[in-house]
Image: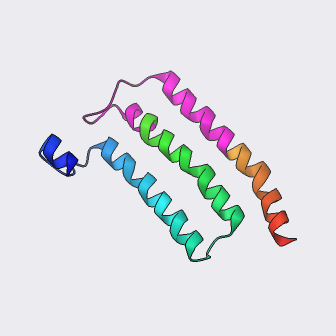
Amino acid sequence: MWADQSWRRFWAWDPKENGALPITLWCGAIFHARSNRMIRETGTAVGVIIGPFLVILAWVGVNLLGIGLHSSRFTSQGAQSLLIVGVFELLFLAIFVPLGLRRERS
């Protein structure tokens, strides 16, 4: 309702609007999988760890495309920061997921 009254449209397929969609779908998938016992504690933790990276990707990564209503110019510092965050996320998961799975089995 707010978007329709503010912008006279609900959805314009702008990259920033589309960047919000994976965040919403990811959170819904984690909630659904956890509530239906498809994943346990470690799976939920991994999903929650990946979530902030999707948010950063939507906020910073979409701006790096340089297109759309809400974009800013491409900056190498933004791309470098996004890469650093992604590497730290992967390292964190590579170290702690095996520990969580081992703990769940015992």
The vertical placement of 48 against 80, above or below, is below
Q: Nearer the viewer, residue 8 or 72?
A: 8
Residue name at image x 73 percent, y 45 percent: 92
Q: Quadrant of residue 15?
A: top left
Q: Is residue 20 left or right of residue 8?
A: right
Q: Nearer the viewer, residue 62 or 52?
A: 52
Q: Nearer the viewer, residue 7 or 83?
A: 7
Q: Is residue 94 left or right of residue 9?
A: right
Residue name at image x 59 percent, y 70 percent: 34
Which residues lie in the magenta part?
Answer: 61-89
Residue name at image x 54 percent, y 34 percent: 82
Examine the structure image and report whether residue 87 is included in the region drawn in magenta.
Answer: yes
Q: Main secondary structure of the magenta part?
A: helix
Q: Quadrant of residue 25?
A: bottom left
Examine the structure image and report whether residue 34 is included in the region drawn in magenta.
Answer: no
Image location of residue 75, percent across then percent down = 44, 22
Image location of residue 18, percent across then percent down = 33, 49
Image location of residue 50, percent across then percent down = 59, 51
Q: Quadrant of the C terminus?
A: bottom right
Colour theme: rainbow
Residue most toward the left?
8
Q: Is residue 46 left or right of residue 27?
A: right
Image label count: 0
